[in-house]
Amino acid sequence: MKRSSMPTFNHSFQVRAPLRAVADFHRSTHALKRLTPFPMVAQLHRVDPLGEGSISEFTLWFGPFPMRWTARHNHVDALRGFTDEQTSGPLLRWRHKHVFKAVSGGLTQVNDQIEYQHRPGLRHAWTRLLYSPPMLRVLFAYRAWATRRALKNQSPGVVK
């Protein structure tokens, strides 16, 4: 098995909501806005409904500083997750795998794995700060909180 030479960031959390509710929340075209913490702001330019090859174009604003991104989605499974990969943006490479797994009828595990690589040189040094492991931990702690908050009133239902 070939290993990636890119740095990897992993984050996992559980949500008291059925698998389908968690998957549907993350498939929403507004999920990025709901999962972006202040002081960042997500400005959506194009967000295709999530599907194999779908595109999202957006700008993440860090205060007055814009970062334009384009991402393509692949390995899309309606219940189990998807991968988004930066096709243009602030980093040299960014691949974010979202995996959802039912733990029980009303509890779902969310696993995020990000492989990333910064652009070389001083001109791009700011990405090494904004997309550093400590900043990613803060971002994904917020995303866990926002997901739980959005899904806190979901009934367990039937999980497939």
Image: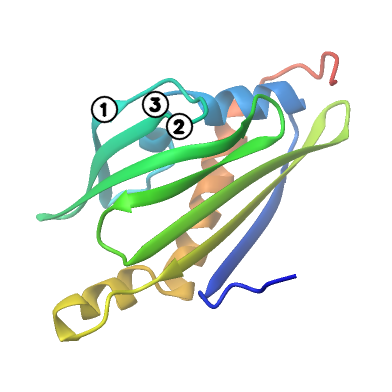
State which tag comes first along the sequence, 1 or 2: 1
- For numbered disc 3, what is the local secondary structure? loop
Number of numbered discs: 3
The kind of residue tagged 1 is Arg
- Mark 1 lies on residue: 46
Q: Nearer the viewer, mark 2 or mark 3?
A: 2
Chosen colour scheme: rainbow
State which tag comes first along the sequence, 1 or 3: 3
Nearer to me, 152 or 28: 28
The image quarter containing residue 53 is top left
- Mark 2 lies on residue: 53
State which tag comes first along the sequence, 2 or 3: 3
- Mark 3 lies on residue: 30
> In what quadrant of the picture does the C terminus appear?
top right
Mark 1 vs mark 3, CA separation in Å: 11 Å
Residue 9 locus on image (x, y percent): 56, 67
The image quarter containing residue 131 is bottom left
Q: Residue furthest bottom?
A: 122
